[in-house]
Amino acid sequence: MKKTTIADVAQYANVSNSTVSQYLNKRYEYMSAETRKKIEEAIEALQYRPNLMARSLKQKSTFTIGIIVANIIHDFSTKIINALEAEFDKEGFHMIVCNSADNPKKEKKHIETLLEKQVDGLIVFPTGENKNLYIRLHQQAMPIVFIDRFIEGVDIPAVLLDNFSAMDTAVGTFRKQPIAFITTSLALPITPRVERLEGFRQALRNRDLLIDERYIKNGEPAEMTEIFNQLFTLEQPPRGIIAANDRIFQELMLYIKKRNIHVPNDVQVIAVDDVPYANFLTPSITTLQQPILPMAQKAASLLLAKIKKEHLADDDQRLYRFKPILIDRDSTN
């Protein structure tokens, strides 16, 4: 069976070969809607499939983006992957998604594998432990954008939540004190964990509230039961708790249910990341939502500009922080 070519599509649609090529490369600027429709119908009728290998060789691009998430079980990770895929798909790029599980060795291995596959660019949730590798890749002009996190001393743009604003909003929402802050392990210098902790302390200072280290905890999810036991057996248990991410929030709600602790009468709760079930719980839980779509759009536009060697108006900016959205529900009323 003869393989369908661009020339066949052009003849069927009654347009030039170059017009079909422009269509396949999503260059529609000077193409009428009627012409696009004719080419689309021709491709469908002839069952034309582009030769991606030839296209890659000709354009020196694999039209592939490597994504390395820190932990794919986080609600934020899955949502941002979905939003990024939609943005890159508009430009004809595909994604390869890897999960580092916050393991620097796995992160390094994934980077090496993706580079071997000749991806055009990388979007990474960095662990913070491969600084020299990122410096080297930046010096080699490899297009990279960080998301959710950044690494000090590495000149790679990063798109992330304004963690200080998030903590200020959270502390300002509580109507009762003392307030506890709980995050996952601080063994690695992971930006949102470190910044949310500092943001929490700063928010207390700004309101002349006491910073009591007994109410500030970090650890692995498996350690949370013991951490919650410590908090709720204090002479004055917390009246408000900030769960710094969705994993801590899950453990907290399980503990509260088992111990028959009443929310919000006994303790008020705010969770960072608007997990879908927060609205279905009784009572519903107040959350700080990360603006997923704007963050994904900014990360994608930054990376695509680097790949295409285009300049953006804010090229010299390194950190792009996005304000959280407070979803005020019953757990703080």
Image: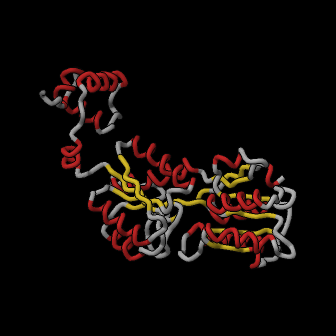
Picture layout, residue 168 above or below residue 48: below
Quadrant containing the N terminus in the rendered view:
top left
Q: Which residue, as the protein is rendered here, is positioned at the far front?
A: 258
Picture residue at 87% right of the left edge, 57% below the top: 265
The percent position of residue 188, horizontal first and vertical second, equals: 53, 75
Side of 189 relative to 10 (left or right): right
Q: Which residue, as the protein is rendered here, is positioned at the far bottom?
A: 213
Q: Looking at the image, how many numbered discs can be counted on the residues?
A: 0
Colour setup of the view? secondary structure
Q: Viewer-proximal residue, 147 or 189?
A: 189
Q: Quadrant of residue 113?
A: bottom left
Side of 239 relative to 2 (left or right): right
Picture layout, residue 136 above or below residue 94: below
The percent position of residue 285, horizontal first and vertical second, equals: 74, 51
The percent position of residue 227, horizontal first and vertical second, equals: 71, 72
Picture layout, residue 159 above or below residue 223: above
Q: Quadrant of residue 248?
A: bottom right
The percent position of residue 93, horizontal first and vertical second, equals: 35, 46
Q: Viewer-proximal residue, 264 or 194?
A: 264
| One can see residue 311 in this view | no
Q: Which residue, as the protein is rendered here, is positioned at the far left?
A: 2
| One can see residue 5 in this view | yes
Picture residue at 46% right of the left edge, 59% below the top: 69
Side of 321 relative to 34 (left or right): right
Picture residue at 67% right of the left edge, 47% below the top: 277
Picture residue at 32% right of the left edge, 55% below the top: 120
Side of 220 relative to 243 (left or right): left
